[in-house]
Image (spheres, coloured by chain):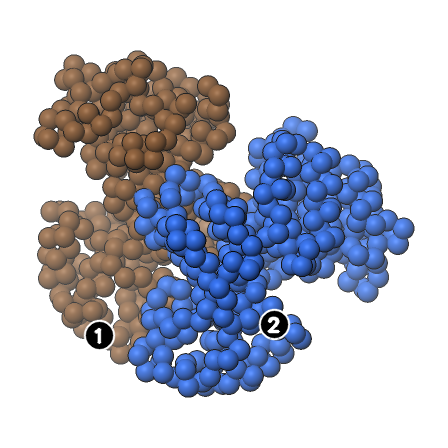
Chain colours: A brown, B blue
Amino acid sequence: MMRIAILGFGSVGRGIARAILAKNLDITVTGLADSKSGIIDAGGIDLAAALARKENGGACGNAGVSPADVVAKADYDVLVEVTPTNVEDGEPALGHIRAALRRRKHVVTSNKGPIALAYPELRALAEESGVFLKYEATVCGAIPLIHAMQEGLAGNTISRLYGVFNGTCNYILTRMAAEGLTYDQALAEARELGYAEADPTYDVEGIDAAIKLVILANTVLDMRTVLDDVERTGISLLTPDALQLAEDQDCTIRLIGEIVPEAGVLRVSPRIIEKDHPLVVEGTLNAVTVGTDLAGDLTFIGKGAGSTETASAVIGDLLYIQSRHVQGS
Amino acid sequence: MMRIAILGFGSVGRGIARAILAKNLDITVTGLADSKSGIIDAGGIDLAAALARKENGGACGNAGVSPADVVAKADYDVLVEVTPTNVEDGEPALGHIRAALRRRKHVVTSNKGPIALAYPELRALAEESGVFLKYEATVCGAIPLIHAMQEGLAGNTISRLYGVFNGTCNYILTRMAAEGLTYDQALAEARELGYAEADPTYDVEGIDAAIKLVILANTVLDMRTVLDDVERTGISLLTPDALQLAEDQDCTIRLIGEIVPEAGVLRVSPRIIEKDHPLVVEGTLNAVTVGTDLAGDLTFIGKGAGSTETASAVIGDLLYIQSRHVQGS
């Protein structure tokens, strides 16, 4: 039996809760908090009831219990930190993750901020405490990319990594190419469908993709980079004419993130790319090609976002920890 | 330091040896044998010298040392079994794997025969002995597909698995479509390039793809199947006309292997498929889509064969075992 505490009960947190219930996983939730309320119960929180309360517009727990209380006082093996990303200073998630690691608790997170900003420090802390820090959900949602690079491709040297890391941009570009829409028309459509935020800057200017590159560079490629190291061009200035020009050559345009470790290159920019290239995926999909010395080029395609998809990555990390460290506890 | 014994010193065995040397891995080879000769040396075999002997047409070791001797007498943590596949009875590999597991040695293999024919028995034996049995290289070469399904996607229920599992057929179909070649012309070309055997039956009749389906079904999907359970149609009767007909609809033809676990379906057959589908890969590539409940559809594309590519999968398995069980020994 693995005991977890969940911070964040938005779409990802609830996706995890639903998966735990539906799959009857050997996991008990002993702490739960969002920004407004929380619960601590060493005997196991009634997840179905908490979900029902939250989905009826209520609070998931008691106003007197904060996320910091859950981190410090609940009785858990793994902290599941799935609050919204803050890329300025990573807070309050960063503080909660630090506190949990200091308590010798494993941490699984979907939060890009702390991993992009403070991975070396957090990793050292995890090693000191003899616990795991896992973050598969921070990059490309449901695609087990970090797993594949750290485990299946262990032994390979990665010479290049490039792909489509942002589903919002990919959706906009897909629609511009398919229907001849302008950028503004396609963005409006993406907003209507919930694929783009009211302020789309974070996605369309390539910031989200750049953060994912920083995470991969620092955690899997032994680089030490920050967001400012990424050369970055977004898609907001792209015209239907540019897409038509690409189309005339049997090509299209995709926002491609690229890392060349040996050259120290990190770059996000719109690229002209042949339509039958494996990275030309449609809609909100993500696709990443990993260039290696032994295995050659490998391409991974899948859903980069979504409540259930992100939950899949978090649960993969939880089961990874369970199979190694929490058995029999 | 992990000690391994290698059975098989053909293209895969030598690829592994070269990778161990080039990457300076913390691995010592204490036993080595092919069908003609062998060496046992607890102090560590000089791999570079063995490679040089073999590549100059000589023997890798002494005629008096057999593979069975290496399995029974060498001092190793992991048996690396990379002899050619025999799908009739899995021998002699099957006997060697059994003997190693009984000696409480981990086993890593690229050999489809024993895994397709005897996985339940071998797995029980490995569990009894408290050791790992790993076989990533048996399916889709360099693609860490089994890893991804067992680890990254742990927690998902797999509803469907389908893809291009045989590079030889994919090469032939690619060339027929691109150049309007007949099946015989494309096959002749594949033979010249070393992509097809003198007797191509195993590949072109879908037997190789079917064996991979059996391995995935039995090892990752909790099914109990044998080769005869796979409905199988090859590509040898396909005409350029059929490909042209597909082309006229912006489609092409690929040999697709498919498993639908709940329906008990295992099938290999040529399918008409839209040209921009992620599974439409060119040349000898493999591509597999895994349909899951949480993560949605995930597609993996990469090289399905080759000395270095297969070595990549074997080394991934070795490092997996090293990180879990052989540390500090």
Mark 2: few/some/many CA within 10 Å (<14, 14-19, 20+): some
Residue linked to disc 2: B201
Horizontal side of residue A24 vs B185, given as left or right: left
**Disc number placed over residue A277 in the picture, else none:** none
Horizontal side of residue B312 vs A46, given as left or right: right
Percent across and percent down for residue A329 are 46, 19
- The reply to whether residue B90 is visible in this rendering is yes
- 1 vs 2, front mark: 2
Q: Residue at x 31, y 14 (%)?
A: A42
Whether residue B59 is situated above or below residue A33 in the rendered picture: below
Residue type, label 2: Thr
Q: Quadrant of residue B329?
A: top right
Q: CA distance from mark 1 to mark 2?
A: 46 Å
Q: Quadrant of residue B15?
A: bottom right
Horizontal side of residue A193 vs B112, given as left or right: left
Q: Residue at x 23, y 34 (%)?
A: A14
In the image shown, does B216 or A87 lie closer to the viewer? B216
Count of numbered badges drawn on the protein: 2
Whether residue B283 is situated above or below residue B242 in the rendered picture: above
Q: Residue at x 73, y 35 (%)?
A: B103
- The reply to whether residue A211 is visible in this rendering is no
Q: Residue furthest right?
A: B64
Query: Which secondary structure, mark 1?
Result: helix
Residue linked to disc 1: A244
